[in-house]
Amino acid sequence: MDLATLLKPASVRIVGRVSSKKRLFVAIAETASATLGIDAANAVDALIERENLGPTGVGKGVALPHARLDGLEEIGGVFLRLDRPLEFESVDRQPVDLIFALFAPRTAGVEHLKALALVSRTMRDPAVCAKLRANSDPAALHAILTETPASKAA
């Protein structure tokens, strides 16, 4: 498994201003709907349900929201870079600007965890995050995410 398999180029977006976590989840769900064929309303509900278990803001401006959905065939991701950081109730209380969301079939146990670990390793790399913040071209962001050493293992 690698990030190039999980993340389609069209699933990478730059988003201007988002006013709330729910609006962020709507933006994620709309992207997932357009690129992964996921029902947007179900995706928003699943992201909120998961977030209610505990915030997925992992610190240093990074959030990794994720959800399992019925009817999904394979694990897929959406990456958003926010122009303006959003308060997210992260573990370090810092706002987030780099969001990598994962959607997995409800039955994807170990594979979902492997994908989440892969994304987490990639997004913990300070050099990767610095490059992501320094670029505003979605194609460049996709290349950064899919060409890093951490994105090739799992």
Image: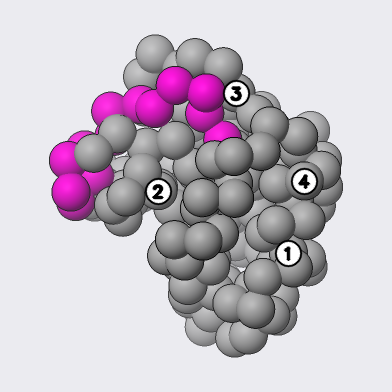
- Name the residue type under label 2: Val
Q: Which mark is residue 15?
A: 3
Dot in front, 4 or 3: 4
Marks 1/2: CA distance?
A: 17 Å
Marks 2/3: CA distance?
A: 15 Å
> At which x and y percent is residue 19?
39, 13
First in sequence: mark 2 vs mark 4: 2
Q: Which mark is residue 62?
A: 2
Question: Badge 2 local density, few (<14 within 10 Å), some, or many (20+)?
Answer: many
Q: Quadrant of residue 150?
A: bottom right
Marks 1/3: CA distance?
A: 20 Å
> At which x and y percent is residue 43?
56, 39
Q: Which mark is residue 140?
A: 4
Specify whether residue 131 is in view. Answer: yes
First in sequence: mark 1 vs mark 3: 3
Q: Secondary structure at mark 1?
A: helix
Q: Which residues are magenta?
A: 81-93
Question: Badge 4 local density, few (<14 within 10 Å), some, or many (20+)?
Answer: some
Identity of the residue drawn at 44% across and 21% down:
84
Marks 1/4: CA distance?
A: 10 Å
Q: Which mark is residue 128?
A: none
Dot in front, 2 or 4: 4
- Name the residue type under label 3: Val
Dot in front, 1 or 4: 4
First in sequence: mark 1 vs mark 2: 2
Identity of the residue drawn at 71% across and 75% down:
2
Identity of the residue drawn at 44% across and 61% down:
126
Q: Which residue is mark 1?
A: 146
- Name the residue type under label 1: Thr
